[in-house]
Image: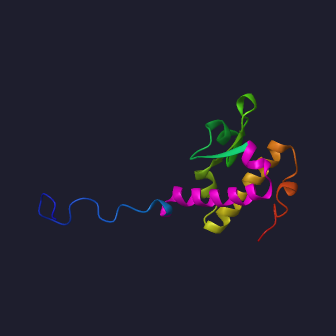
Amino acid sequence: MKDRHDRGRRGAFGRSVPYYRTRSGKFERLASFQMRRLWRKDERFPKMVEVQIREFPPLSALETGEGVYSAVEEGAGGGKSVIILYSRTLQENCREEESLGDAIGEEMVARLAEIFGERPEDIDPDFGLDS
């Protein structure tokens, strides 16, 4: 089909990309993998913690430089604690998919250790080791 000036194709060609190939889709897939890996290690994690993904950290975190990759929100009234992963800052820090997966895993382990008051090495013995 031609456009109204009788040139080229009408509409976007090849614009629809499967979700699993988009930046956010890849990030969610990597975060889901790390979450399942950690949830299998200890049955407390899925009962007491949930994970959310947001694009950007709050401005206050960017100004102080702390919590630019992830944060923890305590559950109200004894509810689940929430680990928040900031996708854009993690993606900008890690150019390769493998290093992004490792960074997501390390952020999740660090935040789980913060929630449960344990050392990150107790949560995941591989914490901080280069693969």
Which residue lies at the image location 78% right of the left edge and 51% below the top edge? Answer: 43
Q: Quadrant of residue 63?
A: top right
Q: Main secondary structure of the magenta part?
A: helix
Q: Quadrant of residue 35?
A: bottom right
Vertical relation: 67 (above or below) 27:
above
Magenta span contains residue 61: no
Q: Position of residue 39 (x, y in %)?
A: 74, 55
Q: Is residue 66 visible?
A: no
Quadrant in which the N terminus is drawn: bottom left
Quadrant in which the C terminus is drawn: bottom right
Vertical relation: 2 (above or below) 66:
below
Q: Residue furthest top?
A: 77
Q: Nearer the viewer, residue 46 or 60?
A: 46
Q: Is residue 83 visible?
A: yes
Which residue lies at the image location 82% right of the left edge and 59% below the top edge? Answer: 124
How has the structure been colored for display? rainbow
Q: Position of residue 69 (x, y in %)?
A: 67, 49
Which residue lies at the image location 64% right of the left edge and 62% below the top edge? Answer: 94
Q: Nearer the viewer, residue 16 or 41?
A: 41
Which residue lies at the image location 37% right of the left edge and 61% below the top edge? Answer: 16
Q: Position of residue 72 (x, y in %)?
A: 72, 41
Q: Which residues are magenta?
A: 21-48
Magenta span contains residue 32: yes
